[in-house]
Amino acid sequence: MPMPIPNSGRDGGPQPPAAVSAVGLRKAYGDKTVLDGIDLRIPAGSVFALLGPNGAGKTTTVQILSTLIAADGGRAQVAGHDLTDSPDGVRSAIGVTGQFSALDDLLTAEENLLLVADLLRLGRREGRFRARELLQRFDIADVADKRAATFSGGMRRRLDLAMTLVGEPQVIFLDEPTTGLDPRSRRTMWDTVRSLVAGGTTVFLTTQYLEEADQLADRIAVLDGGRIVAEGTAGELKARIPGSHVRLRFARPGEYERAAEAFPDAARDDEDLALRVAGDGGLDALRVLLDRLDTAGVRAADFSVHTPDLDDVFLTLTGGATRTGTSSPLHVKETLR
């Protein structure tokens, strides 16, 4: 029997049980390595987002963790069940929504839900109760008797997610769930995900929409070339990318010039009487900056902190391994706490 994956923190102390954990997951197809030994730890009741370009290994990760394909190496547990030792236990605890809706277009919305209930052997009464509950929850009760073929893209994705929830899974894998949706439908899906997590469900999300990860995820991992090249909260990831700065604007040319002397490395904007001072924008850095202004006897009219967004993170950390098949200097895992 496989040994359990340790739940120990950086200081060696115990951590709460993880909903999903993996150590050294590997997968290759022939001579192409898709996953090159990735580690994951996702707390229960949280949203975890896996970002990466096409071909980075996001869908492969979901397929392994949901028991659709076997890993070539490494260990993983989902909802307390080992992938190798208890695949049926994993399947009983999860729901999966793929990139494309898994609906039967010949069936109505209610019939699609009842079909899943039958496959899960819920029983007629419980199945009908769950179907009605989910139709109401996803705001499709008024089209319950309409065939899925007539649904819009947003309605199809809502019904697809409703089908995933028939069995009340502890962990849900959402593989690019909002691909192709209009902005309104995408935000509706985001609200749905938030409500699931508020109820204690764990969501593993893969996405190429960086705003989606920024809006939803408690933690984000960036996957490139089969490796996790960075991990942390959205704010932590942004803070590690060069480009953070504080913009200081001054009301009078004399103040502007004295400030420029105090910050000789700052980028100047003579037209707006503004300086761009590199820094991480943290409280300690801001205190140092303001102290230097006080020492120079200068008062800024206003200041603003600018940090990179997830687009900058994505573009900085991805691309090298996927394009060339070799690891770039950026492909060093940075676990941000």
Image (cartoon, grey):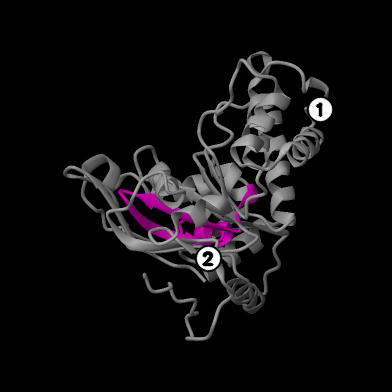
Magenta region: 215-244
Name the residue: 21% across, 49% down. 326
Q: Residue 41 carries which label?
A: none
Distance of mark 2 from mark 1, alpha carbons? 35 Å
213 lies left or right of 36: right
User: x, y percentage for residue 6?
Assistant: 45, 76
The image quarter in which residue 60 lies? top left
Say which element carries label 2.
loop
Q: Give the class, few, some or many, for how many residues have Cα within 10 Å of label 1's Cα (few <14, many ≥20).
A: some
Residue 203 to residue 185: above or below: below
Residue positioned 63% across, 72% down in the render: 283
Instruction: Describe the element under mark 1 as helix, strand or loop.
Output: helix
Drawn side of residue 41 relative to residue 191, left or right: left
Residue 279 lies left or right of residue 36; in this view the side is: right
Look at mark 1 in the image and give the residue it sits on. Answer: 141
The residue labelled by disc 2 is: 80
- Viewer-side residue, 202 vs 325: 202
The amino acid at mark 2 is Gly
Q: Which amino acid does label 1 sit on?
A: Ala
Q: Residue 108 placed where, x, y %?
A: 70, 20
Q: Which of 98 and 268 is in front in this view?
A: 98
Q: Is residue 162 among the parts visible in the rendering?
A: yes
Q: Is residue 252 above or below residue 208?
A: below
Vertical arrangement, residue 227 with respect to residue 16, above or below = above
